Amino acid sequence: MSDRAFYHEFEANFRGGRKEIVERLRVYLPFLRPFTEAAAEPPGLVDLGCGRGEWLELAGENGMRAEGVDLDEGMLEDCFSRGLAARRMDAIAFLRSLPEGSQAGVSGFHLAEHLPFEVLQSLIAEAHRVLRPGGLLILETPNAENLDVGTLAFHMDPTHNKPLPPGLLSFLPRYYGFSRSKVLRLQEKKALAEAETVRLIDVLRGVSPDYAVIAQKAGEPEFLARFDALFAADYGLTLDTLSERFERGLQQQILAQLHEIFDYQKQLAAVHQSTSWRVTKPLR
């Protein structure tokens, strides 16, 4: 954007501060551990649209050799001030400059929704090329399954293109050669995740507001097996889950009201029977 400070301030106001974002990103750390646990040297990871560098910093602290690119100078200033490995460069051009099979991870947080679809396709294809066997692609984006996000919050960002449904974004890596992909729904409220029944407002606003697709390139079965539990786990809240909980709660309320009505009718019938007996009793 023309105002170099605009997007930096926009992120701080509408996405969250640095500490908050770092805490959110910790969900991805288990996916890095198989690369770092037995590595003789830090495995390479490139972050596209690295912004303020929260993921570069966190990944670096957890054993990765992380490097990022972004086109927004205002966002990159945070990276430079922290001594992070970042540069001003187009994401696709950067990927094309990397050797084949050179990286353990390629990531893009809240990048995909900014891109024209054909550019996103190129990014995923190039990511597959530069990843080593068993390498991971991580793409996080707003979740339009959340009705509040899809109809309002997504459109707060003037640089957004259009929402990407989880089914589409998880299909793309498989189409371009990745062996498997997983949808992680993220950032839902913990209390809501554990609730047995929910309100209507929870159905409208409670679905995980973000999601990520994690895709893995084919590799040695023994190495891939170290990720199996992560790919098999369930993450976050779907619209179907909250709708079912709401309907279950509604059914329970209706049944409770019917029981109250039935009990009240029984009481009326008992009173009527008692009154009728007193009126018809013969006088002595």
Image (cartoon, helix red, strand yellow):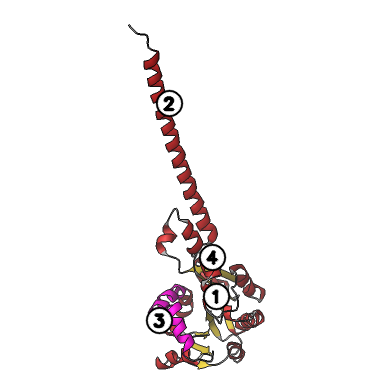
Please identify the quarter of the rendering in which residue 265 is found.
Answer: top left
Looking at the image, residue 23 lies above or below residue 232: below
Q: Return the disc, 2 or 4, that comes first in the chain's sequence.
A: 4
Work out how far the residue at label 4 is from the one at label 3, CA to CA, in angstroms.
Answer: 26 Å
Q: Do tag 3 and tag 2 residues touch (Cβ < 8 Å)?
A: no
Q: Residues within 10 Å of mark 3 (few under 14, many from 20)?
A: few
In the picture of the structure, the residue carrying the numbered disc 3 is: 18
Which residue is found at the position 62% from the left and 75% from the top? Answer: 173
Looking at the image, residue 22 lies above or below residue 262: below
Q: Residues within 10 Å of mark 4 (few under 14, many from 20)?
A: some
Which residue is found at the position 55% from the left and 73% from the top? Answer: 214
Q: Secondary structure at mark 4?
A: helix
Residue 37 point in image, percent of width and height: 44, 78
Q: Amino acid at mark 4?
A: Leu
Q: Secondary structure at mark 3?
A: helix
Q: Amino acid at mark 3?
A: Arg
Please identify the quarter of the rendering in which residue 284 is found.
Answer: top left
Which residues fall within the magenta stretch?
Answer: 5-30
Q: Return the disc, 3 or 1, that comes first in the chain's sequence.
A: 3
